[in-house]
Amino acid sequence: MAVAEDEPPQAGGSKAKKPRKNAAKVSKSKRQIKHRKEINRCEHVTDHYYASGMCKNCYHSKGRVKMAELCDHKDRKLYARGVCKACYLRDYHNRLRTVNEE
Ligand SMILES: [Zn+2]
Ligand SMILES: [Zn+2]
């Protein structure tokens, strides 16, 4: 096994004091963004963040204002993939059953 193969020997004694590994560590910790996902669009600021600055309940009730388009229930709210929740879940279970039967 080769040890530390990714670190070529560097000329110059002073530079050896700051190996690149250290720099990588710094940028890695910087990548952790704190409180980026914060509830700020509904009053449930202590709830678990879900999406669009809202908790799960509010996101589902306020955050989705589109209506279903790809199913017969165009008066219902869009849930996913252009269909209402009932149709989406029915589709989802149908797909599961089909997979299991095969
Ligand atoms: Zn909420
Ligand atoms: Zn539907």
Image (tube, rainbow, N blue to C red):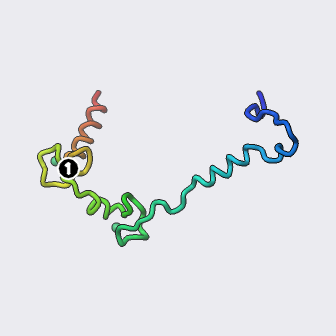
Q: Which residue is mark 1?
A: 84
87 or 51, which lies in front? 51
Apparent side of residue 52 relative to residue 34 in the rendered image (left or right): left
Percent position (x, y) of residue 16?
A: 83, 43
- Identity of the residue drawn at 61% across and 54% down: 30
Q: Splitting the image into 4 quarters, where does residue 96 fall?
A: top left
Q: Which quadrant of the rendered structure holds the N terminus? A: top right
Q: Secondary structure at mark 1?
A: loop
- Identity of the residue drawn at 70% across and 48% down: 23
Percent position (x, y) of residue 39?
A: 41, 66
**Given the image, on which type of amino acid does mark 1 rest?**
Cys
Q: Which quadrant of the rendered structure holds the C terminus? A: top left
Does the closest atom of ligand 2 sit within 8 Å of the Cβ of label 1?
yes
- Identity of the residue drawn at 38% across and 70% down: 44
Q: How many residues crowd mark 1 within 10 Å: few (<14), some (14–19), many (20+)?
A: many
Please tell me whether residue 37 is drawn above or below residue 28 in the rendered image: below
